[in-house]
Amino acid sequence: MPQQMTEPSAGEREGEPLASRASAGEREGEPLARKEPLIPRHAEAEIRRALSDTRIVAIVGPRQSGKTTLARGIAQADDRAFVTLDNEQDRRFALDDPVGFVRGHTALVVDEIQRAPGLILALKQAVDEDPRPGRFLITGSVDLFKGSISPDSLAGRVETVELLPFSQAELARARRSRFIDRAFANDFPAFTTTGATPNLIDRVLAGGFPEAVSRDAPDRRNAWLRAYARSLAQRDIAEIAAIGKHVELSRLVDHAAVSVGTLLNMASLGSRLSVDGKTVDRWLTLLEQMFLVRRIRAWHRSDLKRLVRTPKLHFLDSGLLAALRRNRAVDIGTDRRELGALLECFVHAELAKAVALADEPTAIYHYRDKDQVEVDFVLERSPGMIVGIEVKAAATVRPEDFRGLRRLKDAVGDLFACGILLHDGGRIQRTAQGLLAMPVKALWDA
């Protein structure tokens, strides 16, 4: 459904959070046919802080994640001009005369700027001539300043804020989660009953795309998500690369969905598509730039020789993964083994959203040694502090479930902040020094 921000309230004009629509699409700024409830975005506070001291602020994230809604709302609240390059006439103007496009604007919002990347040089010239902070807010459905999309890095002139699909805290209209900060501080109770994560399977299958979570019927949601993946692979990716094999690229997305959470084997994926491993690597880079998937590098240290260094592949939305894998709630209810890969993807997505807004830079890795002992996620912060996170799609926790976390703890030593086993149970329990089991909902309730 087309989208448009409603007129902001007085409170919003005074700096209260704006929002994204639960059913908002990002289609050329057409008016809404009916009003939808608004969901505040945690990234807005970060964007406003950046606008206060940085000349250009970029909101980047996948299509349909709510960037246009949020940027349009900020434009309305701050009385900024708003232009979307999804509009053909505006796009043609930006392509033909980028300097003229920017001239005369002291405060401008440009939506989907990757559709006219030459405009970035015109913005650079404008802010070099007039370096006041907050002049330009831009959005892009590709990772603008990684790879070859942008003609300039805008070093020292731009701050980038990542906007992924809704987090569970946003869907609950709750404050931003403190889970990661508390994990690095080892700030969890030794024992407390919290109750199990409500509707866990439904949460995992829905994911966080605004348009998807607005659809109550699972079949309609899955149809939208599969069409979204096809459109991204077959049409949108052409904006950033000349790819002739769109069918093969779509098939790569399908094969990646089957292989999610396992060690990435380029040669194996390539053989299924009749292309070489280097081509798969190049295509995966494009899918990463479009925020569809993300490669999780293996954590290692130079003094540890028995660690596997092969990355894993994860999707950035568990609902999209479930739709591509044709997973249904009824099937998972009768065979919980189907939940494992989906839940790991769900946890990764929540971590990625939290890391994107974290005050301290935090990297996400995985751990695996040559004994095939592994930890699903390893979070690292300077000066090398480590948090291990293991995911289990069951309510019962056994001592052997901590094997990977114990191995990671031994490898890290004093830099190990804590190890957390996320499960489908209903209590937080410390099992050993620095090792805890806790419900999945701690990701957004903490």
Image (spheres, rainbow, N blue to C red):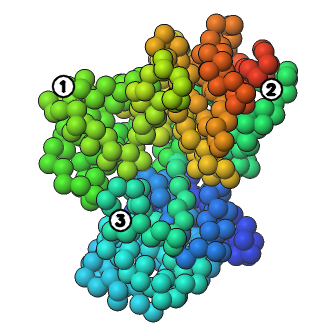
Earlier in the chain: of badge 3 and badge 1, it is 3
Crowd rating for badge 1 (residues with CA inside 10 Å; few <14, some 14–19, many 20+): few
Crowd rating for badge 3 (residues with CA inside 10 Å; few <14, some 14–19, many 20+): many
Query: Is 94 displayed left or right of 413 in the figure?
Result: left
Q: Residue visible at 49% across and 83% down?
A: 127
- Which residue matches tag 3? 150
Earlier in the chain: of badge 2 and badge 1, it is 2
Whole-angstrom CA distance, mark 2 to mark 1, is: 47 Å
Give the position of the N terminus as an image quadrant: bottom left
Query: Which secondary structure lies at badge 3?
Result: loop
Horizontal and vertical percent position of residue 391: 59, 22
Earlier in the chain: of badge 2 and badge 3, it is 3
- Which residue matches tag 1? 271
* Mark 2 and mark 3 residues within 8 Å of each other at the beta carbon: no
Q: Residue visible at 23% across and 55% down?
A: 241
Query: Is 14 displayed left or right of 294 in the figure?
Result: right
- Whether residue 196 is visible here, answered yes or no, is no
Horizontal and vertical percent position of residue 18: 65, 65
* Mark 3 and mark 1 residues within 8 Å of each other at the beta carbon: no
Q: Residue visible at 21% across and 39% down?
A: 279
Question: Foreground: 428 or 3?
Answer: 428
Question: Foreground: 276 or 116?
Answer: 276
Q: Amino acid at mark 1?
A: Ser
- Which residue matches tag 2? 194
Number of callouts: 3
For residue 387, what is the image quadrant? top right
| Depicted 339 relative to depicted 142: above or below | above
| Depicted 243 relative to depicted 131: above or below | above
Whole-angstrom CA distance, mark 2 to mark 3, is: 47 Å
